Amino acid sequence: MKLSIKEKVGYSLGDTASHFVWDLVGFWLLFFYTEVFGISPVVAGWIMFAGSIWDAVVDPIVGIITDRTNTRWGKFRPYLLFGAVPYAILAVLAFTTPPFSPTGMIVYAAITCLLLRTAYAFVNLPYSSMSAVMTNDTYERAGLNTYRFIAAYVGQFIVTGAALYLVNYFGAMGNNEVEFSLLDSIAGNKEGIVIDQAQGYQYTVIAFAILSLLFFFIAFKTTRERVPAPKKQDNSISKDFKYLFQNRPWIVLTVVGVVSFVMFAMQNAAIAYYFKYFIKNTEEVQLFNIVGTLALIIALPFSKPLAKRFGNKTVFITSSIVSGIFFALIYAAGSNITLIYIFNVLAKMAYAPAVPLLWTMIADAADFGEWHLGRRTTGLCFSAAVFAQKVGWAIGAAAAGWVLEISHFVSNAETQPDSAIFGIKLLVSVIPGVLYASCAIVMAFYNINIDTTNRMKIDLEAKRASEL
């Protein structure tokens, strides 16, 4: 079934909303913990890793609850409306610096981090699951997810491009007799200006949290759920898990999700350190992130036509190998900023088509469970896959902290030891490059091809028609 442009755009804004907050977490939370809270890298890494343990409890519960939710708005849409407010509030609290002791700061950081991840699960997991029930056509799903990730990376573009400028602008408010405008922040005119980093981060998150609330509401209003769950399916939770772990495509995609998100998180967490201590220009990270995000946005529309021509699996494998090579080449670029930018742009453009395809294939895996195994678990399928990706994200962020620790990194030091510089360089180049290229090996075991998706669509449509 075809989706209107209005509905695709409306749905896509939900991921812009997520990125307005979650990219602040992904790009800046570890940096915020070490440079503003004053928590050691290893402890900050453990806090990030603890979130994955918490997700092991929360994410499957969310999937089970949403699969059993039945309202006039559908199974998943209501969570966009009612989950957005606590998500926004907890995001602000996570970036708020209370007047606590060092131990109190660690406890506060851990609690707010875990609560924020919980709120994120209750809004983002249902949102992700919606792509499987808005249409039953795999190529429409690829198109829908292309809109989604263009909007997502627009959100990332705004966050990565504006965050530090906003932090400086808001951090100067009320702290100086000299007037300091946003244009001054962008131009770098900070001489004589005292920046309160704690205040700057808090106000910046408040601004993005308000925008996030608005966009989630638009996504709720403009979308509809159309693919129903089987009417005769019982509510056995044990059967849900039993059949989920018999779903080979889902298992493959889960492993790919863990590995690829370790790579994303590791690189994102380390990039600020890379520019501060190796390139020795902290402000450069803004432009680097902007250019990389633009490369993603430009290449994303190629996802659907490439998938229709070569198939989801082939495109994903090729993307993993090529982008992994270019990421690794960033190490070889040394301090040549031009080559660093070129390799990063090529890597981002190479992996962009695979981004929406991963979520398209998870939706196909939910169809596969109903078609091949006789049981549909859309919410659990997506929540378990997203949980795996968050495990990967937590492992990657934690690993970044651990690598910094074992390489003898010293927070806020004027000069870092050679071992720390070596570790930072590996975190943004060779390690993520090897990890992402290895996803191609795992995807070789994915067993849904073009013929399978066509047969699933025909058979499931006939089955649903017979149940009316």
Image (cartoon, grey):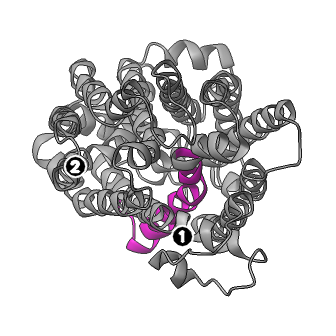
Cα–Cα gap, marks 2 and 1: 23 Å
The amino acid on which the numbered mark 1 sits, given as a three-letter code, is Tyr
Rendering coords of residue 174 (x, y %): 79, 77
- Which of the pair 374/419 is nearer the observer? 419
Q: Is residue 118 magenta?
A: no
Residue at image position (48%, 76%) is 186
Rendering coords of residue 321 (x, y %): 17, 32
Which residue does the numbered mark 2 point to in the structure image?
340
In the image, the segment drawn in magenta is: 1-26
Examine the rendered structure and indicate whether residue 275 appears above or below residue 11.
above
Rendering coords of residue 429 (x, y %): 28, 35
Which residue does the numbered mark 1 point to in the structure image?
165
| Quadrant of the drawing holding the N terminus | bottom left
- Most extreme residue toward the left is 309
Query: Horizontally, is 194 left or right of 163 in the view?
Result: right
Question: Could you tell which of marks 2 and 1 lies nearer the N-terminus?
Answer: 1
**Which SS class for mark 1?**
helix
Examine the rendered structure and indicate whether residue 247 appears above or below residue 290.
above
